[in-house]
Amino acid sequence: MLPIYTKSDHHEKMNRHPFGNGQPKGSGAYPIGGGGRRGSAFNIRPDKYDKYQPRSIRGRRRKAAMRVGGGVTLFFLLLTFLFPSLRPAGLFGGLGLAIWGGGEEFNIETVRYYDLANVGGTSKGWEREERILLCAPLRDAAPHMPMFFSHLRNLTYPHHLIDLAFLVGDSKDNTLNILSDMLAELQASDEPKMAFGEISVIEKDFGQKVNQDVESRHGFAAQASRRKSMAQARNWLLSAALRPTHSWVYWRDVDVETAPFTILEDLMRHNKDVIVPNVWRPLPDWLGGEQPYDLNSWQESETALALADTLDEDAVIVEGYAEYATWRPHLAYLRDPYGDPDMEMEIDGVGGVSILAKAKVFRSGVHFPAFSFEKHAETEGFGKMAKRMGYSVVGLPHYTIWHLYEPSVDDIRHMEEMEQERKQREQEEKEKQERLDKINSQFEVGSSQWEKDKEAIQGATKEAAAKEQAVLEAKQKAKADEVSKEPKTKKEQSHDDKDAKDSSSEVKQNPSPQQKADGQPAKHPEEAKRQKSAKDSEGDKPVAKADPPKDETEADMPKKPAQR
């Protein structure tokens, strides 16, 4: 049955819809109505379907462009994922973190990415550009700063790969001011390879009460508290300065006097987790010339382990003191000046003068215990802890660096006595020289005149000696002549005749070659000698004519012997 339509004053019609289900007026899907309110009547007009007309050419172009752009973007992201060198440094920072998770820096300033697998530390870190953190605790170190910075300048490891970290604590001198000035001078050097990397200066006091003199620092009573305080300083410095980019950590005391310039490369070449050199110190000649210094590098012994079991829980064993006889093999006492510097020795405790360790050792939790760890603290406890965690700890017994000589109170007293003796000797020599100068000035004698007088005296002495020798020879000759002129006794005459007879018989039996040739009998040697002397005397004297004898009787008259 069809519905009945009735007119109204408002010309409204009842909305009808096959699926109205009694919904309120105007709520149907297809509202109907006549010339009442606009939009209330069902009106079928062509303009209502304009929006359902086919898409225009501009819309199709826009969609195609979007598709092409998306493809290019996807291709670019794929290339950057496959080839890291093509990744942009400052573009798509957050997107890069989500997609490839790499890059040294992201576009977001507060986000950094580090891969610790690349900073494990190798034997040739200088070739792989591995960074080193050089740590130096300072306390009243002003006198040693120039020497320490000279060592820094001479290091052969690339300086831009070395970061410096200093902790100044409990200092009473101007260590901090000197450090700042020298760092500024070092970084402003004209040499392009002299400047270092990042530099950190940290101030922290630990209430250290022990004085810095030798007796106080090395006295047995102060060792436990001093070691624990030094351990705190090292841990503070390390925790504040260690960066994710560091592969090695090098601890160095400022009072090292002599060390090889290549010490970083030399120690790194062994590729050990913890490694230390041997440390000695020079001494004056009257003390022996040299001496082992760092006794904190040692191997464990059964005696020391037994001693540790008898001590309290908080006790700290320190080496080099009679109170703790550990009988450990010390690295310092095994030094051979001519030994192999690359020879390694496994140790349990390490000294703190010079330590090179891989950064992963500290990242894994090894530190310098400021408490009693296995009855040890600070560097010795550090070595014990590293060994406990399975890291390699070695020392080089024949690779030696030299610590600065610091005289003790007894040494200073002895040196003062030696200095007084030296001054006393110098004063005595000075006074003696002054007396000699005074004598020479008061009794001045010309050197030339003195030489002349000396020569004259020597000449007169020689002349007198010659005269005395001539007189002595004349007396001896006269005495010999008198003896020869004296008449011989019968006994002497018979003895001479016998000797002459024997000599003549011998000559006759053995004539000379000339006599044999001439057929003459051999002459007696004495006779030949007399004849020769007579000829010589005749040759010297003028030849005089011999007067003929006056008569025969005179010539034949025998001559009387001369009167005595």
Image: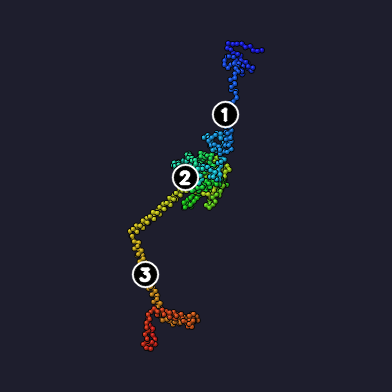
Q: Residue furthest front?
A: 57
Assign the N terminus to one quadrant of the image: top right
Which secondary structure lies at badge 3?
Answer: helix
- Report the front residue among 427 and 149: 149
- Which kind of residue does numbered mark 3 sit on? Glu
Q: Depth-wise, is mark 3 or mark 2 nearer the camera?
A: 2
Q: Depth-wise, is mark 1 or mark 2 nearer the camera?
A: 1
Q: Position of residue 258 (x, y in %)?
A: 49, 48
Q: Depth-wise, is mark 1 or mark 3 nearer the camera?
A: 1
The disc, 1 or 2, on the residue closer to the chain's N-terminal end is 1
Residue at (58%, 26%) from the top-left corner? 56
- Which kind of residue does numbered mark 1 sit on? Arg
Q: Position of residue 411 (x, y in %)?
A: 46, 49
Left or right placement of residue 244 versus residue 480 in this view: right
Which secondary structure lies at badge 2?
Answer: loop
The disc, 1 or 3, on the residue closer to the chain's N-terminal end is 1
- Which kind of residue does numbered mark 2 sit on? Glu
**Circles 1, 2 touching at the beta carbon (< 8 Å):** no
Question: How far, Cα to Cα, is label 1 from label 3?
Answer: 142 Å
